């Protein structure tokens, strides 16, 4: 039986004979049902319509779906002290992408920031030899294709190695996770925040939204909590959720200025 994929958010669901009656991810106020109604595809159908874009993004191997499909996130391969991590995920797996990952040493674990990017995480795990998928426990309810390879972590911080720490920054989703990589990929360290701190188009700031497509701001108390959690982490760079949406250099100053700007704006 196929594992249907939502056309609007890219989430893959568990095996079933017919498409699910609805997509809980899209019906949530942080996302939306497509203007033409709920539509479904399968991995095989998606592979016939789209290819993967496989190329460097600011020194890291990136993988994303080429063309207009769902949310335009890209996954990144992070060669860290915690192993080779696939940060984020997409809805399509191809032989070319698997070969590119293998050529760089493979993938030891998939780590995903929040439910909008769960996409075809189990499909990827299968293709990569059944590697574990690490998600925050607070977002367990949003998993649409359960698997015994999914590992849930708890708390506000999880140290994967001397140079990699996961931080439950919350705000966007209860379990929204940022990854801090102290030793790379460039000098000064980097933050990979998913959508919890989204790099904006000027690439000099980040912003804080509960819903990006529906323009619902993040609660002020969540922004304050995020700021306190990130305090003390050195970061030269901030890698955003999609191609080129990165702050390269002065990342700590950019994040601090963005907290100040946001909190001043919502208090005015």
Image (spheres, helix red, strand yellow):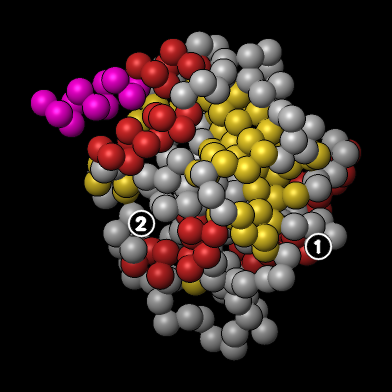
Asked whether 52 falls inside the magenta stretch, the response is no
Query: Residue 244's x, y, as percent?
Result: 54, 27
Query: Which picture quadrant has residue 147?
Result: bottom right
Q: Are marks 2 and 1 in contact (CB under 8 Å)?
A: no
Q: Secondary structure at mark 1?
A: loop
Answer whether residue 85 is visible to the viewer in this image. Answer: yes
Above/below status of 262 relative to 84 = above
Above/below status of 10 relative to 252 = below
- Disc 2 from disc 1: Cα separation: 30 Å
Answer whether residue 61 is visible to the viewer in this image. Answer: no
The one nearer the camera, 247 or 254, is 254
Name which residue lies at 59% across and 36% down.
Answer: 179
The one nearer the camera, 229 or 46, is 229
Query: Residue 7's x, y, as percent?
Result: 48, 63
Q: Quadrant of the N terminus?
A: bottom right
Query: Residue 142's x, y, as percent?
Result: 48, 65
Above/below status of 206 relative to 144 = above
The one nearer the camera, 76 or 191, is 191
Query: Which picture quadrant has residue 130?
Result: bottom right
Answer with left or right where residue 204 lies relative to residue 47: left
Name which residue lies at 55% across and 12% down.
Answer: 249
Q: Quadrant of the C terminus?
A: top left
Residue 130 is tagged as: 1
Q: Main secondary structure of the magenta part?
A: helix
Name which residue lies at 60% across and 31% down.
Answer: 180
Name which residue lies at 32% across and 46% down.
Answer: 210
Residue farthest to the bottom, as pictured: 17
Above/below status of 64 relative to 229 = below
Q: Which residues are magenta?
A: 258-268
Query: Residue 121's x, y, as percent?
Result: 65, 59
Mark 2, Cα crowd under 10 Å, few <14 / some 14-19 / many 20+, is: some
Which residue in the protein does label 2 denote? Answer: 31
């Amino acid at each position: 039986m196929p594992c249907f994929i939502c056309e609007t958010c890219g989430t893959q669901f568990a095996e079933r004979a017919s498409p699910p009656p609805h997509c809980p991810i899209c019906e949530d106020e942080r996302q939306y049902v497509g203007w033409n109604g709920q539509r479904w595809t399968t991995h095989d159908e998606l592979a016939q319509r789209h290819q993967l874009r496989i190329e460097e993004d600011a020194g890291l191997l990136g993988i994303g779906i080429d063309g207009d499909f769902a949310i335009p996130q890209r996954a990144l391969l992070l060669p860290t002290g915690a192993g080779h991590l696939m940060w984020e995920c997409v809805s399509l797996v191809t032989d070319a992408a698997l070969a590119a990952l293998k050529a760089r040493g493979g993938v030891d674990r998939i780590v995903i920031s929040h439910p909008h990017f769960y996409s075809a995480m189990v499909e990827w795990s299968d293709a990569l030899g059944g590697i574990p998928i690490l998600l925050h426990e607070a977002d367990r309810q949003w998993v649409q294709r359960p698997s015994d390879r999914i590992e849930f972590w708890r708390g506000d911080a999880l140290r994967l190695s001397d140079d990699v720490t996961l931080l439950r920054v919350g705000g966007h989703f209860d379990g929204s996770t940022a990854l801090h990589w102290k030793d790379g990929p460039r000098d000064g360290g980097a933050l990979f925040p998913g959508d919890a701190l989204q790099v904006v188009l000027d690439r000099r700031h980040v912003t804080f939204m509960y819903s990006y497509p529906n323009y619902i701001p993040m609660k002020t108390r969540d922004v304050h909590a995020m700021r306190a959690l990130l305090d003390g982490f050195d970061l030269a760079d901030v890698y955003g959720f999609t191609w080129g949406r990165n702050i390269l250099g002065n990342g700590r100053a950019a994040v601090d200025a963005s907290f100040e700007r946001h909190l001043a704006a919502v208090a005015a």
